[in-house]
Amino acid sequence: MIPSLFNETMSLLEKSLDLRGRRHEILVSNVVNQDTPGYRARELNFEEVLQSIATGKKSQLVRTNPKHLSPGGGPGGSEGGIVLSENPAGYDGNNVNVEQEMTRMAENSLLYNASAQIVSKKFQGLKAAIHEGRF
Amino acid sequence: MDFGKVLDISASGLNAQRIRMNVIAGNLANAQSTRTPEGGPYQRKDVVFTASPAPFGAMFESALEASNTGVEVTGIIEDQRPFKRVFDPQHPDADGEGYVEFPNVNLLEEMVNMMSASRSYEANVTAINATKAMIAKALEIGR
């Protein structure tokens, strides 16, 4: 039964936490550059990327030669999916919408916390099983 | 996923906004200064923000995937707009026609800039708090 201890759900949750963290990083750098002329906001389409991981579909970048660098920054690296925002740019060429970024950041960290909570609960469940229901 | 890097990015934003605030404070303080060490009235200063050129490691990474950038103040420029000419023959710095050149600082503009800087600073603080909450939650997994 050992393989089912850390089953698919766990690895998906792990990926979810990783992606949420990555998205947070992108949102933070958008907020930081809200006054930088010419900066284009970026976005990570979380749902799309997670789905491509869940269904086993990898990103479009494929290593065709073993001497090439891996596209995702090593094993377990990012799956890409970062796109430039299509928001209209202001007079200085910057298209960061701070309200949008802050809302997304709030949403993203709440969902990160939710994933972390689920992982935590899963471990608690395991612990309960190990201790035969006694804590 | 490296939260330290995220905090560094936010910190670079705080730093840049603080420098901007310093420059604005200097402009406001010198709104009436007719003499400077370089001679002539004070010239309004402005900051130049640049999405920071990452260090080598991050540059290398950015060649592989879009890396996330902080912000950096890459220069403080002097505003080239003409000085304000005010008629005041009694002033020690008045020219032959009795006109004094005052700095090209517009108080209204500086106040608006200051508000913008302080709001941007706040946004960065909020981002840091969100990051901290996420780190705390991640640490709770092991409990």
Image (cartoon, coloured by chain):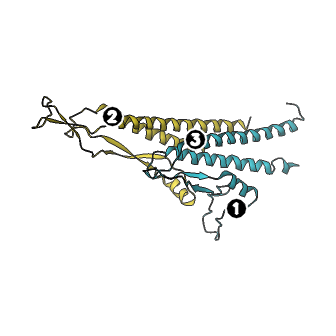
The residue identified by callout 1 is A58
Judge the density around disc 3: few (<14), some (14-19), many (≥20) Cα neighbours within 10 Å: many
Which numbered disc, 1 or 3, marks the residue closer to the eye?
Answer: 3
Disc 1 + disc 2, Cβ < 8 Å: no
Instruction: Indicate left or right for A35 with A103 as reference.
Output: left
Q: Which chain is yellow?
A: B
Query: In front: mark 2 or mark 3?
Result: 2
Marks 2 & 3, CB-CB < 8 Å contact: no
Kind of residue at disc 1: Lys
Residue B1 in sight: no
Give the residue type at disc 2: Leu
Tell me, yes or no, whether dots 2 and 3 are on the same chain: no
Q: Which percent across, then down, holds residue A21?
A: 64, 46
Q: CA distance from mark 2 to mark 3?
A: 30 Å
Discs 1 and 3 share one subunit: yes
Residue at image location 30% in from the left, 40% down from the top: B44
Query: Which residue is the site of mark 3?
Result: A102
Query: Which type of secondary structure does the marked residue at label 3 adopt?
Result: helix
Q: Are marks 1 and 2 on the same chain?
A: no
Chain corresponding to cyan in the figure: A
Instruction: Give B94 or B122, whichever is nearer the viewer.
Output: B94
Q: CA distance from mark 1 to mark 3?
A: 30 Å
Nearer-the-camera pick, A134 or A84: A84
Q: Residue furthest left?
A: B96
Name the side, left or right, on which A5 lies relative to B74: right
Residue A40 percent location from the top left of the image: 50, 53
At label 2, counting other C-alpha atoms closer than 10 Å, the crowd grade (few under 14, some 14-19, many 20 or more) is: few
